[in-house]
Amino acid sequence: MPKKAREYPEEGEFVVATVKNIHPYGAFLILDEYPGKEGFMHISEVASTWVKNIRDYIKEGQKIVAKVIRVDPSKGHIDLSLKRVNQQQRKAKLQEFKRAQKAENLLKMAAEKLGKDFNTAWREVWAPLEEEYGEVYAAFEDAAQNGIDVLRDIIPEEWLAPLEEIVTSYVEVPTVTIDAEFEITVPKPNGIEIIREALIKARDRANKENEIEVKFTYQGAPRYRIDITAPDYYKAEEVLESIAEEILRVIKEAGGEATLIRKEKRIKKIKRREK
């Protein structure tokens, strides 16, 4: 079970918790990411409406996402709320929790290669990476995308080789795909050839950059779709702007017209390599 480097959660933090026992006035929950820590959720924090029976909303053994509303380390008190967590926040926290589980499994693999136990791995690798990146899996993504040297000054040298092998094989690097459409017309007998040549040149020039992929798809005259996949949204936007400028220039010089129509960005993940 992934655990945080901090002893106590912070106010406003979202946590994964398991319902331990339920009383008429509230419930006690085990904080999954903070070993040995429990929180209390008053019945008034279970739902936004009046709650007659708390068991209509939660059950013993159930895992929930709760929001930390008060922390008193001197007394060991942690107050939680369920009603202050919306669906988007719950989804984001569960995704973060799953990423932490993946990171834990990968770190265990690295520890096994070095003949170390997980407590040592947690102290030497997990804690410093979490402090630096906010979450360990984000550090592994950075290493998979930009090379293991990004971790060199954060963790002991002996961990770099086994982690490099593992993150290269198993870590999914997030990418962003944005798509747009061009409306292009060239009122000449060879207009289609001019458009095709302009799109091919723009695509090939962009694809020369590392980790950039550009695809054009004919949608039916006069529409052409472009998909740009890049490591992040800003790079994708930069490439789209460059391509658009080139296409608009070429088409204008040929006596035609071109208009860029924006679409939504998409997030996807690409595995580096699987064994």
Image (spheres, helix red, strand yellow):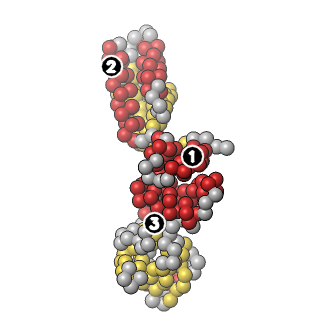
Q: Position of residue 48 (x, y in %)?
A: 39, 76
Q: Give the residue at x 43% y 69%.
A: 6
Residue 83 visible in the shown view: no
What element does badge 1 sit on? helix
Residue topped by disc 2:
249
Please give the residue where the numbered disc 3 appears in the rendered image: 5
Label count reads: 3
Image x and y of residue 162, in percent: 59, 49
Q: Is residue 93 left or right of residue 106?
A: left
Residue 110's disc is none
Q: Which residue matches tag 1? A: 161
**Viewer-nearest of discs 2 and 3:** 3
- State if disc 2 and disc 1 touch (CB < 8 Å): no
Type of amino acid under label 3: Ala
Q: Amino acid at mark 2?
A: Arg
Q: For the point 45% across and 89% down, which residue is it?
A: 25
Using a 10 Å C-alpha cutoff, classify the residue at mark 2 as few (fewer than 14 neighbours), some (14 to 19) or many (20 or more): some
Rounded to the nearest whole Å, what is the CA distance between mark 2 and mark 3? 54 Å
* Residue shown at 42% from the left, 42% from the top: 232
Residue type marked 1: Ala
Disc 1 and disc 3: Cα gap in Å?
24 Å
- Badge 3: how crowded within 10 Å, few (<14), some, or many (20+)? some
Examine the image and state in which quarter residue 134 appears.
bottom left
